[in-house]
Image (tube, rainbow, N blue to C red):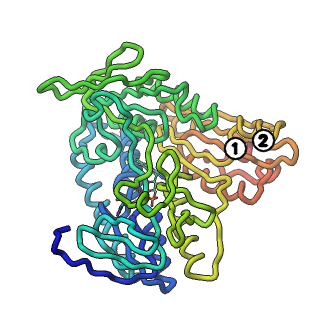
Amino acid sequence: MKKKDKIQTEEFDLCVIGGGSGGVRAARVAAQLGAKVALAESYRMGGTCVIRGCVPKKLLSYASQYKKDLQQAQYFGWECDVGDFNMETFYNNKHKYIAKLEAIYENLLKSSGVTIFNTHAKVTSPNTVLLEDISKEISTKYILIATGAKPFVPKVEGSSYAITSNEFFLINQKPKSITIFGGGYIAVEFACIAKGLGIATHLVYRGQRLLKDFDYDITEELTKSMLAQGINIQLQNNVTKLERHAHATEVTTHLANGGKIVSDLAMFATGRVPNIDNLGLEEVGIKTDAAGAIIVDKNNATNIDNVYAIGDVINHVQLTPVAIRQGQFLVERLFSDKQSYIDYSSIPTAVFSNPEIGVVGLTEEQARKQYGSIKIYKTQFKTLKDGFSEAQGQVLMKLVVSTKDNKILGCHMLGKYSAEIIQVVAIAIKLGVTKDDFDNTLAVHPTVAEELVTLK
Ligand code: FAD
């Protein structure tokens, strides 16, 4: 802001900071309920999910599966070549598609009556937000912070030679090789994507097992499958230093066990931290926890009256549908008679690894701790398509059932269609479905999902 610029003040009922999954939904619904709403977005409308998260990641995941599909197609009689993956073509098409989605988001907001400010926003008091770059102050009844999270990069010598998932989405030439650090869902997904695209892939994780919060059988089977695909997985190892020699294009990763990996790219997928840079939290006295997440109560209210927070910035459950629902329920509570609260139990989730994972409810380990006596039903098989075409890959299905009342406490799936199937299983589990209900349901044959109702 130039010194002489005069700050103009505009009045609103609600000022939303962040145009991601949660912020966009909150702004739109509040405006539809009659509130005068401002939304500030400093980067691109749609936030992480649309611009550099769920959506482009799923597109990459689709891209990474064509090699197997084309190989299988030959088995089914199609005369086609597998060929190579052209990252530039993918990048250009992805860029166009994401720009289209971004415009849709923007139009939805505008047509609902939301005033958009494409700039960084900072909270300056419980009722004011400063848009410094455009010399504007928003005076508002309520403030909603929905600024999301950003990749965490550990303090390692040479860490600037590595990228994060944000930059992976900007690559338009296929690297020959990549070393990914991390063992969470983003690390696992990108390792499978890279391998599927024909990139030599190394995955280095300091922990004992990948996806440590998932059911043991699922992660064991996924790890086996990733190794079988040729991904070099190094568990209980860690990056100690990254190096790039003058004029070299490759990055050398030095490892805790004394080893070295040389690859075109190195990428940190080592967690995400709340996005609170220059947000004015300290000045206004908005409390955060040790990780920098904004502390909220069950109303999504911060310790300062009229200031609320939702989504990844509160570091509760970092998923798009959760941020969206938090945003929707909050503004409904503020601007209508509807007083709904999220039930955080049994949130279904997917990992778009290869093979993909779909889970809902308790893992075997969690159920044993909570319920003591449980029953486990498990099956492992090849899909008809993979069996016919002699392709690699197994489906694993597991039901965790309470001995006391036969209620299904958890469902864990690995393999094709798991993400799609788990969405429907989640409805049944929310309704308190029992194993008898599954048994009494007739199968749809021949499908993958039918195995769920024939588990013995
Ligand atoms: P975001 O969507 O991150 O939006 C926050 C917005 O605020 C951003 O656009 C940012 O630019 C803006 N902003 C920040 N500070 C300011 C400021 N001071 N002023 C103005 N604007 C500001 N979730 C799923 O459910 N399924 C998936 O498959 C999935 N895959 C993912 C893959 C990756 C690689 C990543 C990184 C995330 C993925 N997620 C997935 C998580 C999901 O993207 C997030 O949970 C979700 O986007 C959170 O929404 P949000 O509204 O809290 O924040």
Q: Residues within 10 Å of mark 1 (few under 14, many from 20)?
A: many
Residue 296 higher or lower than 381, as above or below: below
Which quadrant would residue 197 be assigned to in this image?
top left
**Count of all numbered marks drawn on residues in the image:** 2
Pick the front one: 318 or 455: 318
Task: Please tell me which residue is depicted at 31% across the width and 31% down the height of the picture.
Answer: 178
Task: Please tell me which residue is depicted at 27% across the width and 32% down the height of the picture.
Answer: 265
Residue designated by label 1? 362
On the picture, is 341 further left or further right than 38? right
Task: Please tell me which residue is depicted at 51% across the width and 62% down the height of the picture.
Answer: 310
Q: Residues within 10 Å of mark 2 (few under 14, many from 20)?
A: few
Residue type highlighted by circle 1:
Leu
On the picture, is 192 further left or further right than 267? right
Pick the front one: 453 or 113: 113
Residue designated by label 2? 370
* Image quadrant containing the C terminus: top right
Q: Secondary structure at mark 1?
A: loop
Residue 146 higher or lower than 114, as above or below: above
Residue type highlighted by circle 2:
Gln
Which quadrant would residue 370 be assigned to in this image?
top right
Q: Earlier in the sequence, mark 1 or mark 2?
A: 1
Q: Are marks 1 and 2 in contact (CB under 8 Å)?
A: yes
Q: CA distance from mark 1 to mark 2?
A: 9 Å
